Amino acid sequence: MKFPKEFVWGVATASYQIEGAVYEDGRSESIWDRFSRTPGKVLNGDTGDVACDHYHRYKEDVALIKQLGVDSYRFSLAWPRILPEGKGKANQKGLDFYKRLIAELLEQGIAPAVTLYHWDLPQVLEDKGGWLNRDTAMYFRDYAMVAFEELGDVVTSWITLNEPWCSAFLGYGNGEHAPGKADFPSHIVAAHHLLLGHGLALQGYRQLRLPAEIGITLNLAPQYSVSSKPEDLEATRKADGFQNRWYLDPLFKGAYPKDMGELLAYVVPAVHEGDLELIAGSNDFLGINFYSRGLVSAAGRVSNPQGPVTAMGWEVYPEGLYDLLVRVHEDYGPIPIYITENGAAYHDVVEAGRVHDRQRQEYLEQHFEQAERAIQAGVPLKGYYVWSLLDNFEWAFGYDRRFGIVYVDFETQERILKDSALWYQSFLRK
Ligand code: FCB
């Protein structure tokens, strides 16, 4: 495989999934602390209380990242560490943790790519309505400004939101994620406020004239129809509108998709004058998290996909990455693109100190090939981050689903480079 010289290779994580230390140094409760403590919400009653204990072991983890030989590390800031009240006064100790982490990365020559919001909203803001409350978008901007001002001289790239579809739909639409609200129409309002928060943060960022690039990360999945019957094609168009276009269109075309009648009816009351202008336009790049595709029939999503599946039950369909990249470039470009997450969960076992995760290695290799194909086809793909550096707290699945290329023994906190990590390392050396 041949990638451009300046192509950025990385690994990714997120605050609540790895940090632990939830009571330390003034951090306040997040919606995920509350949700994971609610019986029945997370598999095995797991919480992020300790997770990978990264808050204390960040040096060791940066050493692992260095060992892999990647260019960049994508991680997220915990809003409740930086602004324990959600707004107002910043917590110096929280900021200091990220300053130490970034200093360590820079010392090792690794570029910090920072996500501002990877789902851990301060619970105090949820108590005021969370993302259903328009004020949360303003609070997000204020929090972002603190981060930009405090860390803006050392961060290489900023991502405002991770996967607003998940925050909105899983958080407020079906309740599978924190804060666990299940009201389909209102999740569209949450999505609008998330996008508005993104737009406001971007506007604030531009005023500071900082050097780093800034963008947003969406979880996109190409949708394929099971047949060419009109009713299946129609269902596929809707599935694409729901997951992909509902976010891409306002961000890159300044309007919600006109063909999504029901959703439009839900969003109209929430859209104030000027919102769409704010949301659209000035991203330096688009981040895409890619895991699988959707196969759609009029009867609903197909639950027995054609290919092999991962431990999440997600179909492995690498060609989908190529199709998606080409399509996004054609319909929304020209915009530089990063794959900000791609990876797979498998039930790993340690055998004599090694983890032979051949399937994960193949998954990665096949997706690299499709990424390369997309570059050949003219897509301005600038980088790729493996999800994830470490096995971690996989949201509603707790510690049961392992996505890491580094194995974590959650009893001892021992880290073991899986075969996929060793493969990635040798790939990068070449
Ligand atoms: C994405 C999330 C990430 C991780 C992967 C498996 O939706 O952004 O935190 O959980 O899925």
Image (cartoon, grey):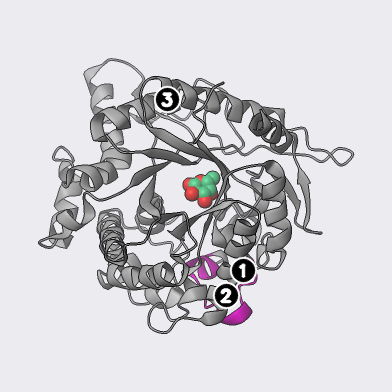
Residue found at the very far bottom of the displayed protein: 89
Q: Secondary structure at mark 2?
A: helix
Q: Which residue is mark 3?
A: 375
Q: Earlier in the sequence, mark 3 or mark 2?
A: 2
Instruction: Judge from the rendering whether residue 234 lies leftward or rightward of residue 345; answer left or right.
Output: left
Q: Amino acid at mark 3?
A: Ile
Q: Position of residue 14 (x, y in %)?
A: 54, 56
Give, as a single range, the part of the protein colored magenta: 20-35
Q: In this orientation, does residue 419 appear?
A: yes
| The N terminus - image quarter | top right
Of pointers 1 and 3, the one earlier in the residue sequence: 1
CB atoms of marks 2 and 1 within 8 Å: yes
For disc 1, the marked residue is 100
Which residue is outermost to the left? 273
Count of numbered badges drawn on the protein = 3
At 28% from the left and 71% from the top, the residue drawn is 138
Residue sitting at 19 percent across and 58 percent down?
A: 278
Examine the structure image and report whether residue 318 is included in the region drawn in magenta.
Answer: no
Answer few, some or many: residues within 10 Å of disc 3's Cα (few below 14, many 20 plus, some between 14 and 19): some
Against 303, residue 202 (above or below) is below
